[in-house]
């Protein structure tokens, strides 16, 4: 009897809704929650999805494609060109180094034939793009030195999949190669090799020109319709269409999506595309991780526990050592290198593709290939635990977390009235203002590279994840008067605020909010003092615009302050009604009209009073008139 699609959807979504919050409750990554959900509903435990777990993988792997499209959108082509040395240098050192060690290890220790050894070594040399990038995003480390280095290696690996898939058929017999060609047929398979190369190069060039001269104008036409659902459909069409085009010529759909994202990165639709694609990407990635969890064959592991567990540990250690060596070559600090090396120490999703392909070619025996698939899945499952151990037990004792002059001192050896969490452009501006007024502050930041630079500049900055209760206690949060939450990542900042309010209820919080939506979340958590980046900068510019248009400077500044006051009051009212769309829209319209009326009255009152405060031009004019009298 065929399983009902709606029932399958309920099973997958229920498993995610139950397991992911539990994982987050214990401070674990959401990835672990999805993996555990897959294990629970998979064939090894409840058997709710049976052998069809593989079917969902083909659908869910599209989440990786969408993720790479979004990465491309965030990567300016000029920055991509500047990173080429890191991509080629770090990426090639990692892939070649890992492959060579695994190849000779399999040859001499396990006595496999060289074709099997090379195929498995290539499959295991690649890391999980989905796990690493998702972890970096959750930790707010995407734009740090560790994040950029990880991305460079992952991008090289994704590109390397193409030549790897081209090399593997050369290791097989003629019959197996012909059989695989039938299953892996592309529209250019019948052409000569040099013609195929020209077609591939032409396809890549075509993506650039199509993106720049066809997609952008097309998106402008769609945008004029003002139909959000049509724009969402167009965004999905871009990703699906480019991926399909790349697949037709035998290339990786993920690489094609990445290239399309890079082409559209400088367009005016970058943020709109990102907002439309992100929800689909997150859902499909969740399904992908559930599929990975469901694919772990615990019966096979139970039958061969020593081989599989030892292989997983050996693989993790080898990849860690190779990556750590690459980090040393590129002069990374100890703590940066640990995060970089542990984060990429697992096998990846492309390993499933390579092993499946090698099974079709009969290069790797089915029994051994299934064991390798279990090894890949277990190594992916192990990574979040290793990351947690690194953050909780290893990093507090290495690198910039300790003072250079006395390594035996505690992590934080002072208790100040003010604690600032997050010392990027936003937090450092606050910190410099407070320091200029001779106030001592304790600063916490999770970017070790930034911490090192700031400490050289004379700031007392301490490395650490501010969402850890132990670090907040060490920073003196129980005795401080003021806590400033200024972390760049809104989700992390909200999590921090929730933690501080729960464990330090008497500590006054000033919280950064990126926009009105973030402010609503802070209001829900009982934060009274929130500061929206978009509001104050926009009002400041509006004030300058009024002055340029002939308004008195004092009047313009007063109007700006009044606008902020009214807008903050409006935000509190809208926060209560934001879940009721109709009531929210009505309230917005009413508040905007009321705000404009109040500002007009205030301006009229000032004009009636002939208020020329702060108006230097009026004073000059008045003085000139007096001299002529």
Image: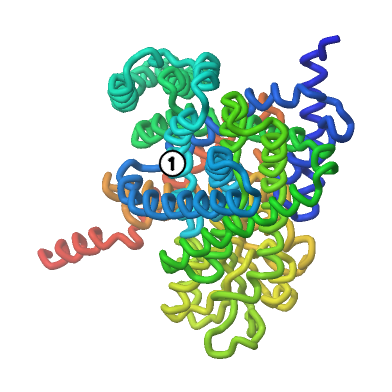
Label 1 packing within 10 angstroms: few (<14), some (14-19), many (20+): some
Question: Residue shown at 21%/62% (left/top)?
Answer: 622
Instruction: Classify 608 as above or below 340.
Output: above
Viewer-nearest residue: 490 or 136 = 136
Q: Can you say which quadrant of the picture contains the N terminus?
A: top right
Q: Residue furthest bottom?
A: 406
Answer left or right for 251 relative to 48: left
Q: Quadrant of residue 176?
A: top right
Viewer-nearest residue: 323 or 305 = 305
Viewer-nearest residue: 216 or 436 = 216
Q: Quadrant of residue 53?
A: top right
The picture places residue 610, in percent across and down from the top left corner, at: 35, 54
Instruction: Classify 172 as above or below 181.
Output: below
Question: Residue shown at 45%/16% (left/top)?
Answer: 186
- Say whether residue 398 is visible: yes
The picture places residue 389, in percent across and down from the top left corner, at: 71, 63
The picture places residue 331, in percent across and down from the top left corner, at: 43, 68
């Amino acid at each position: 009897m065929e399983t009902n699609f709606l029932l399958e959807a309920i099973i997958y979504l229920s498993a995610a809704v139950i397991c992911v919050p539990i994982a987050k409750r214990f401070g674990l990554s959401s990835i672990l929650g999805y993996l555990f959900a897959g294990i629970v509903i998979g064939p090894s435990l409840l058997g709710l999805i049976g052998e069809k777990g593989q079917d969902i993988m083909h659908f869910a792997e599209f989440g990786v494609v969408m993720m790479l499209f979004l990465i491309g959108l965030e990567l300016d082509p000029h920055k991509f060109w500047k990173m080429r040395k890191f991509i080629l240098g770090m990426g090639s050192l990692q892939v070649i180094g890992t492959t060579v060690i695994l190849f000779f290890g399999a040859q001499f220790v396990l006595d496999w034939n060289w074709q099997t050894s090379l195929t498995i070594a290539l499959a295991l040399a690649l890391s999980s793009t989905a796990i690493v990038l998702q972890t970096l995003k959750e930790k707010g480390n995407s734009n740090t030195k560790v994040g950029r280095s990880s991305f460079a290696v992952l991008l090289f690996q994704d590109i390397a999949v193409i030549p790897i898939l081209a090399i593997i058929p050369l290791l097989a017999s003629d019959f197996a190669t012909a059989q695989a060609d039938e299953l892996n047929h592309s529209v250019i398979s019948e052409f000569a090799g040099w013609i195929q190369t020209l077609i591939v190069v032409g396809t890549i060039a075509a993506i650039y020109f199509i993106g720049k001269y066809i997609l952008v104008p097309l998106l402008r036409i769609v945008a004029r319709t003002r139909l959000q659902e049509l724009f969402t459909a167009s965004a999905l069409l871009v990703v699906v269409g480019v991926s399909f085009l790349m697949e037709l010529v035998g290339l990786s759909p993920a690489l094609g999506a990445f290239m399309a994202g890079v082409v559209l990165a400088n367009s005016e639709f970058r943020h709109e595309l990102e907002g439309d694609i992100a929800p689909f990407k997150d859902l499909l990635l969740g399904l992908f991780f559930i599929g990975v969890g469901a694919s772990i064959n615990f019966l096979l592991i139970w039958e061969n526990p020593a081989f599989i567990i030892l292989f997983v540990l050996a693989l993790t250690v080898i990849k860690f050592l190779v990556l750590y060596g690459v980090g040393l070559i590129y002069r990374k600090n100890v703590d940066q290198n640990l995060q970089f090396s542990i984060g990429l120490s697992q096998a990846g999703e492309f390993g499933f593709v390579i092993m499946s392909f090698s099974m079709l070619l009969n290069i790797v025996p089915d029994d051994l290939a299934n064991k390798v698939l279990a090894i890949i899945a277990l190594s992916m499952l192990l990574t979040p635990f290793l990351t947690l151990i690194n953050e909780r037990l290893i990093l507090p004792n290495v690198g910039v977390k300790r003072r250079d002059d006395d390594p035996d001192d505690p992590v934080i050896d002072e208790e100040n009235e003010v604690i600032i969490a997050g010392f990027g452009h936003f937090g450092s501006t606050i910190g410099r203002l407070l320091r200029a007024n001779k106030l001592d502050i304790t600063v916490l930041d999770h970017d070790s590279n930034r911490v090192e630079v700031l400490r050289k500049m004379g700031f007392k900055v301490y490395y650490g994840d501010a969402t850890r209760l132990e670090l907040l206690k060490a920073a003196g949060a129980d005795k401080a008067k003021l806590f400033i939450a200024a972390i760049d990542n809104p989700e992390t900042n909200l999590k921090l605020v929730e933690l501080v309010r729960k464990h330090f209820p008497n500590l006054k919080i000033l919280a950064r909010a990126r926009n009105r939506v973030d402010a609503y979340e802070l209001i829900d958590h009982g934060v009274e003092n929130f500061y929206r980046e978009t509001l104050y900068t926009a009002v400041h510019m509006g004030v300058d615009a009024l002055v340029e248009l002939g308004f008195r400077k004092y009047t313009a500044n007063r109007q700006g302050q009044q606008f902020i006051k009214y807008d903050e009051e409006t935000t509190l009212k809208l926060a209560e009604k934001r879940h009721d769309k109709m009531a929210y829209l009505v309230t917005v319209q009413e508040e905007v009209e009321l705000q404009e009326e109040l500002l007009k009255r205030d301006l009229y009152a000032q004009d009636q009073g002939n208020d020329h405060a702060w108006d230097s031009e009026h004073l000059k004019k008045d003085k000139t008139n007096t001299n002529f009298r």
